[in-house]
Amino acid sequence: MTSYLNTINGQPVASEQVLASINPATGETLGTVPVCSPAQVKQAIAAARAAQPAWAARPDAERKALMMQVAEVIKANAPYLAEWVTKEQGKPLGGVGPDQVPGARFELWGCEVWTQVPASLELPVEVVFEDDTRRDEVHRKPFGVVAAVAPWNWPLLIAIWQIIPSIRSGSTVVIKPSEYTTIGTLELVRLINTVLPPGVVNTVSGAGEVGAWLTSDPGIDKIMFTGSGRTGARIAEAAARNMVPTTMELGGNDAAIMLPDADPKAMAMGLFWGAFINMGQTCACAKRLYVHESIYDATVQALKELAQAMPMGNGLQDGMVMGPIQNRMQYDKVVDLVESAKKAGGTIVCGGEPKGGAGYFYPLTLVTGLHDGDRLVDEEQFGPVLPIIKYQDVDQAVASANRLSAGLGASVWSANVERAKEVAGRIQAGTVWINQHGMIHPMVPFGGIKGSGYGVEFGVEGLKAVTRPQVISIKK
Ligand code: NAD
């Protein structure tokens, strides 16, 4: 069995202990990865610290050019890395175009684009005040060493979201991938280290305790975390002790609201992918669908037809659109929530029973007849299950959307964009999409509010978020 290694200071590093990476479609062991010791975490932070001044001192054009080379490395190795995403995470390989299934190849294409875009963005000096007596400039400075902790749902794409803006602005990075999807990230970082100077991007693998050692270390200057709210709160506590700023991208429970004038047939495909991309294991998936009573039955029917037509299986096989749930814990959570929905009087429109056999496969499941307060509505399912809730008036739907602590995304669906915008403005969420859901873009800031976290990623705002402002104030 192959043992995959961390990269620290540009060198492959093994650990005494290892953990196995499992294919969720088959249960097979794919290889082992190191479980870093506390000393190895310190070693990685020291390597990042040592590399940072020279990295930050490079001319901007040089850093940009190196980052474009990183994008080329990702592109050249995309088939290899996409296969790891499918084998470890479960999403089918799919394709990249607009008509293609957004699977592992799409994830690698995203990695390339989310590298090129920050590489081409600038953070020029801003003159915020000037008169006859003074001139005040805001300069953007790198933080220093960024600790990144990533989840298992989009393992490579989220790693890139954390790594690339940080190094673009002159910081160096130590990243801990999820223990469920480690190999792909170790391989990605090994490959991009072929063009980056040693120490600029380092990995430390292992379970939560390795993440805790990393994020509580006083040698860290900034933390980027994507994962559950519970872990986010622990990291925020540790960061507070060291006065370290954090970006928290936490869970969501996005509401999608179909207004009475929305066309169920025309909107079904967008709604479907908004809810079921990556088997629903996406932070900003539509996780509660509120539909006006006048179009309720037609919407349920249109979604049912799509859900039943999607082939599910091992994502390495051609033609697969849906894969397994990524891990046992998540699978059990989905089963539990569907069973709770049945007990609460919900009607299973399709799916609703585990498939059995090897792998964590669970059918695409639509549930009607639920209400606010039922567990499947109130708790983040993070899986292939969608509750469809009937409403009578729009104010009621907006109140439903806003009643939970989650505030990542939401969407409003309507034939009238102005009407949809008015509703969107009343929803408490970091992003409200109109007639689409979850459609993130590398130029558009993305982040949650309330229990979904704080701070944004992507675009100029995202780049600013991984820098410190420094004011230079000049007397004339
Ligand atoms: P998780 O919080 O269990 O784990 C995330 C990472 O944190 C893993 O690498 C884990 O090892 C590490 N970790 C665990 N305990 C730690 C500790 N005490 N200190 C430091 N690190 C620790 O989350 P998950 O199950 O991997 O991801 C699923 C969750 O992430 C969902 O709730 C989902 O909505 C959320 N998510 C949010 C976004 C977003 O952008 N908002 C994106 C993807 C996923």
Image (cartoon, rainbow, N blue to C red):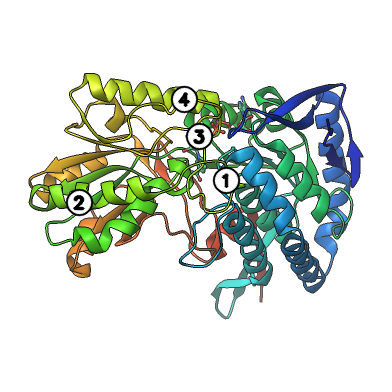
Of pointers 4 and 2, the one earlier in the residue sequence: 2
Closest to the camera, between mark 4 and mark 2, is 4
Q: Quadrant of residue 114?
A: bottom right
Q: What residue do we see at 88% from left, 46% from top?
A: 50
* Distance of label 4 from label 2 (alpha carbons): 29 Å
In the rendered image, the vertical position of residue 338 relative to residue 395, given as above or below: above
Q: Verify CB contact (< 8 Å) between mark 3 and mark 4.
A: no
* Distance of label 1 from label 4 (alpha carbons): 17 Å
Q: Which residue is mark 2?
A: 299
* Distance of label 1 from label 3 (alpha carbons): 12 Å
Of pointers 3 and 4, the one earlier in the residue sequence: 3
Identify the element where label 3 is drawn. loop
* Distance of label 2 from label 3 (alpha carbons): 25 Å
Q: Which residue is mark 1?
A: 315
- Regarding ligand 1, which quadrant of the image does it lie in? top right
In the rendered image, the vertical position of residue 247 relative to residue 352, given as above or below: below
Q: What residue do we see at 90% from left, 40% from top?
A: 12
* Mark 4: amino acid: Gly
In the rendered image, the vertical position of residue 375 relative to residue 76, given as above or below: above
Closest to the camera, between mark 1 and mark 3, is 1
Of pointers 2 and 3, the one earlier in the residue sequence: 2
* Mark 3: amino acid: Ile
Of pointers 1 and 2, the one earlier in the residue sequence: 2
Identify the element where label 4 is drawn. loop
In front: 428, or 283? 283
* Mark 1: amino acid: Gly
Q: Which residue is mark 3?
A: 325
* Distance of label 1 from label 2 (alpha carbons): 28 Å
Q: Which residue is mark 4?
A: 356
